[in-house]
Image (cartoon, helix red, strand yellow):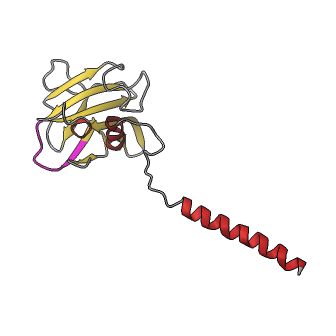
């Protein structure tokens, strides 16, 4: 009799702990529930896309972007606005068709080139939206004409090197 009491007691505790563990796993949380983001930072984090700039196995940099129309629609509308962060080994600049000094890096939204590019200081109003905080990354505010498509595909080319498309779906937030 004494042996059977010891066997039942650990089984009861095991069963209780198993049920408790299963029920505690059924909570309504998401990736942002443990962070304290404001709505703008939350939208920026879900909008962040990144790609290596490479040719075959040779990587020369990284590009990251945030679709600002979804992050701050009150301020960014009427055009397609992106915050772009670019790092290349040679510190190449984005090509601005409206500038006398042309860069090596061509940025396109689908087949369209930007209509406005503004190079940003490393400390700017978008600081904190991108988790990149270093001295070797260049930041740009880029505007394209409004796209009629709901699917936006942003690509970057630097000579033979290119990024994978950074794809956004309008009205996703």
Query: What residue sits 39% from the left and 34% below the top?
Result: 60
Q: Is residue 147 magenta?
A: yes
Residue lying farthest right? Answer: 2
In the image, taking residue 8 as reference, residue 96 lies left or right, namely left
Range shown magenta: 145-154
Name above or below for residue 12 compared with residue 99.
below
Task: Please say whether residue 94 is visible from this viewpoint.
Answer: no
In the image, taking residue 19 as reference, residue 56 lies left or right, namely left
In the image, taking residue 92 as reference, residue 31 lies left or right, namely right
Name above or below for residue 62 compared with residue 92.
below
Measured as percent of width and height from the top left, residue 153 is found at: 22, 46
Q: Is residue 109 magenta?
A: no
Name above or below for residue 162 compared with residue 117.
below
Measured as percent of width and height from the top left, residue 141 is found at: 24, 27
Measured as percent of width and height from the top left, residue 120 is found at: 28, 21
Query: What residue sits 34% from the left and 30% below the top?
Result: 86
In the image, taking residue 138 as reference, residue 151 lies left or right, namely left
Q: Quadrant of residue 21?
A: bottom right
In-front residue for pair 3/40? 3
In-front residue for pair 137/129? 129
Query: What residue sits 37% from the left and 30% below the top?
Result: 87
Which quadrant does the N terminus fall into?
bottom right
Q: Quadrant of residue 146?
A: top left
Measured as percent of width and height from the top left, residue 54 is found at: 36, 41
Task: Please say whether residue 136 is visible from this viewpoint.
Answer: yes
Query: What residue sits 21% from the left and 38% below the top?
Result: 69
């Amino acid at each position: 009799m004494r042996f059977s009491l010891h066997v039942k007691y650990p089984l009861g505790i095991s069963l209780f702990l198993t049920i408790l563990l299963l029920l505690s796993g059924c909570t309504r949380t998401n990736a942002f529930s443990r962070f304290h983001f404001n709505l703008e930072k939350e939208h920026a984090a879900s909008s962040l896309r990144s790609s290596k700039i490479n040719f075959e196995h040779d990587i020369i940099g990284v590009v990251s972007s945030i679709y600002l129309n979804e992050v701050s629609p009150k301020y960014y509308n009427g055009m397609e606005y992106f915050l772009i962060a670019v790092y290349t080994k040679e510190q190449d600049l984005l090509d601005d068709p409206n500038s006398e000094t042309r860069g090596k890096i061509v940025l396109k939204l689908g087949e369209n080139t930007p209509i406005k590019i503004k190079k940003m200081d490393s400390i700017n109003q978008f600081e904190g939206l991108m988790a990149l905080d270093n001295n070797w990354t260049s930041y740009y505010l880029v505007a394209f004409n409004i796209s009629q498509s709901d699917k936006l595909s942003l690509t970057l080319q630097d000579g033979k090197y290119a990024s994978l498309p950074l794809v956004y779906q309008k009205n996703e937030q």
